[in-house]
Amino acid sequence: MEKSLGLATLLFFLLLGIVSVEDRNPPLFCTLDQAWEAAETEQLIGRFSNKDTLLEHDLYLLSDSAGQPQLFYADVLTPVCIDGVCKPVFIELYWDLTGGYAGYGVYEDKPLTKFDHDEFLPQDHKKLDQLLADNNSVLRRKELSDLFDEQATALKKIEFQGEELDAVSGATKKEIKESIVEGALYSCYTLWHLIHGEAARDIEDYLDSIYTEALEERFLFSDYGPYNYYALKAMEAGSFSQYGDRIATIFGTTKPLIRTYILKKMPADLLRPEDLSRQFYQHFAAVDINTKTLLINHLPQAHSSALTLLSTQLEIMTKNQLKTYLEVLAANGSMSAEIRKNLEASAGSQEYAYGYLIGQWLSGR
Amino acid sequence: MQKILFSIICTVLLLSGLHAQTDILIEAESFSDKGGWMVDPQFVEQMGSPYLMAHGMGKPVADASTKIKIAKKGKYKIWVRTRNWAPGKWDPPGQFQVAVNGEKLENKLGLTPGWGWEYAGEVKLKSKKPTEIALVDLTGFNGRCDAVYLTQSEQEPPAFGEELASWRKEKLQEPLGPETTRTFDLVITGGGIAGCAAAIAAAEEGLQVALIHDRPVLGGNASSEIRVHTLGIYGKFERILKKIDTEHYPNGSPEAKLDQEKRDANVKAYENIHLFLNWRAYDAKSKDGVIQYVDARQTATGERIRFKAPLFTDSTGDGWIGYWAGAEYTYGRESVHKYGEAWDEWGELWSPEEADNFVMGSSILWQTRIADLPKSFPEVPWALPVAQEHEATAGEWYWEFSRNDLHQIEDGEEIRDHMLKAIYGSFSNAKQVAGNENYELTWVSYLLGKRESRRLMGDHIFTFRDVVEDAEFPDSVVVETREIDVHFQQNLQDADKPDFLSKALFYKTDEYYIPYRSLYSRNINNLFMAGRCFSCSHVGLGGPRVMRTTGQMGAAVGFAAALCKKYGVNPRDIYTDHLEEYMKLIENQQWKNP
């Protein structure tokens, strides 16, 4: 019975094109290494092309033993050509489930080489990883032919009225030089466009087709920022209160773009309960300046304890942030003795550039 | 040009016995010898007046001085309106003193945060002899002086707001309106590339044009004072735009000076362009949706002129004329849903779900050189909270600053000062690195190169959708192929990045078009706009904000103004009643010989 059930399962997976991953080659870099470890099956989900080589490559979804999607993967053999001379590049590429770059691997017997045939050194791999992780690389809007011209013109000094000035002839060339592995421009170009080209868009579309509430919850509770962001974007603002604690935790640890997104999207009354309000406002001192502004702007909707909490943080506010805080305070009517005490202390502080504004405000009351 | 010093006005009035005043207010920008101090008129609307600034890049500048005569001898207290522009736990960077007849007064100035009066000291003055007042810079790091006030009273002058403004008017004996009125066919405010192109186009069609510009040289962001190179294509207006554009040198390059000479000479060659350099508009009044006049003030002498015309163009960049006249305008980033401007690849960075005011920032460009010998650079502790660990010996377009609590117009001075701290601090850090001993700052602009501010609303609001959908219009007067290019601050993605560096997102496009209907106000009947204050969304501005494109807008407006004059109509009527003739006029520009 057990045997026939196992056979049926195997047949089912085969029908779906899901097969076990064997003889796995560990990637050199993988931002989601646990996902890679967990991956046990692969499923061909489509093919993507490279506009420069016109070659097509298979794109696989890697899943764990429970069928949970983990990573997207492609085993790529592509020519890298310049002036009609081509060489093969063998590389394994990984994407996260949102289509973002997750890492790459190379085969021991097929190392990446530069155009002088030297093998990539560890620092070259590190630089390639950084380049591939930059989805807004300067390579993004370059054609291969542009690069050839760019490299032909070396960085030059600018002369004006007989004086040599330290300037580069266009930021772009400098940016290209700084971002690529020296001697491997065309490999860098080709790989960057493989990672951030058609495959990434196909993955985004595929994710839409498999996105469920369960996956949303998995994304939200993941330690991986892009998954948090995806879940927050996909989620209705009305659902924020259901996950208030988790969102507050993300808020405390994530990058400014996601923090500001959370604050802008959250329903006005989310910060009304004292506990949740505290969970957000306790990060005030640590968060970036733009997030601070939004936290101050949210004060009218937040629990009143947030006003008191921020009265201890006046001296890290910018001028306009302080003005907004004082406006909220004025609109609030009465002021606690504790807030007044804190205001007076900051007004008299020699350390705080805008203490005089607090002094003016207090004297105007 | 006739110069009127307020001090002289006061003196004449005093000597004639009309007023037995025992006080004199001297506007710093009216000093007869400005020495190495610069007139900075960028923030008049916020702090009340142009001011003098000691922009010496760390080397004290030469004294500014002026002479006055007082009516009554005796002891005078001297107050100076100034500020400490980088308050904190260090010596204020912009310190200076006042010297009277060569004797420095006891108090150093530039010490208190926020614009206000600081007490310089007391002097004994004789009434017969002229008194020389001088500003003595102590640091070379952007000390600033708005005004000097001599009084026998014990009372400190009002510090800010309406009280200060009316006190100022009273002290300067300023009449309610400008002393002079001039009338033209077209009054253009703002002598950037768009304003210049508008002036040339209109002048070539025979209009008498006033071009009001608050700097001594034309070109705005492309001028040798800001040094951004022009980008974009010429469209139908190559002949005109080649007179005023720039080569593709690196941003900040002194090569800008050559293009400056070309531009100034070419615009001045038109006899019917009446150029008002160093004049800053400060008001525009409309009645029943029609602008009656624009008032402007000479930035140094304070002289005023009322400019009247049937047609006005706002090329101020900040949309000031429209703002004063009551034109509908917008500021900030619209919600992605408002005009359907999503680009999924970049989401919030491109266009946010919720509207906000996180607009593209302003830049300050700068330049260094490698000298033959080591060059010292002063310590700048006040700059390091901004620069932090960042090291740099050159700047570029991505030295850009925007923050969601700052308004690109209302907080312009803070934005400029933040960039100065970024530059001085990063350069100071770089100077500590072995091998950089010979680096020397040769030029740092003190003028903000703004990308985005107010956008006046026209009959058509140009958006990203017009680009994505390849929209062509019956009134397509501007054509562009350059990418749509929207900037964001690097520290949004990575909190460890300096807050003064940006990144660009580029949306590649084929040709796209801007209709004429985006170049006139939808509720002020005789107002054109050309330049970054044209009618567009935040993302819509991303592409056409570059200066050959804004130049195309200017030229299109200039030709429209000519037809308005021919038929005695307003801008909208050109679209509704004279479009065929207008489009033919524009089309024909490309066949005209240089």
Image (cartoon, coloured by chain):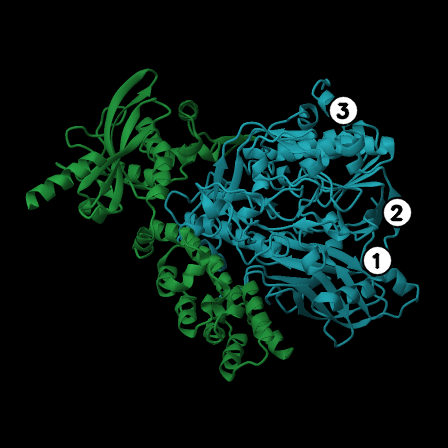
Chain colours: A green, B cyan
- Label 3 or label 2, whichever lies nearer to me, is 3
Callout 2: SS: strand
Q: Is residue B273 left or right of residue A56?
A: right
Please identify the quarter of the rendering in which residue B175 is found.
Answer: bottom right
> What amino acid is at disc 3?
Leu
Please identify the quarter of the rendering in which residue A149 is found.
Answer: top left
Letter of the chain that mark 1 sits on in the rendering: B
Mark with earlier residue (1, 3): 1
Marks 1 and 3 sit apart, C-alpha to C-alpha, by 51 Å
Q: Nearer the viewer, residue B13 or A3?
A: A3
Mark with earlier residue (3, 2): 2
- Label 1 or label 3, whichever lies nearer to me, is 3
Letter of the chain that mark 3 sits on in the rendering: B
Q: Is residue B290 left or right of residue B58?
A: right
Is residue B477 shown above or below B25?
above
The residue that disc 1 covers is: B8
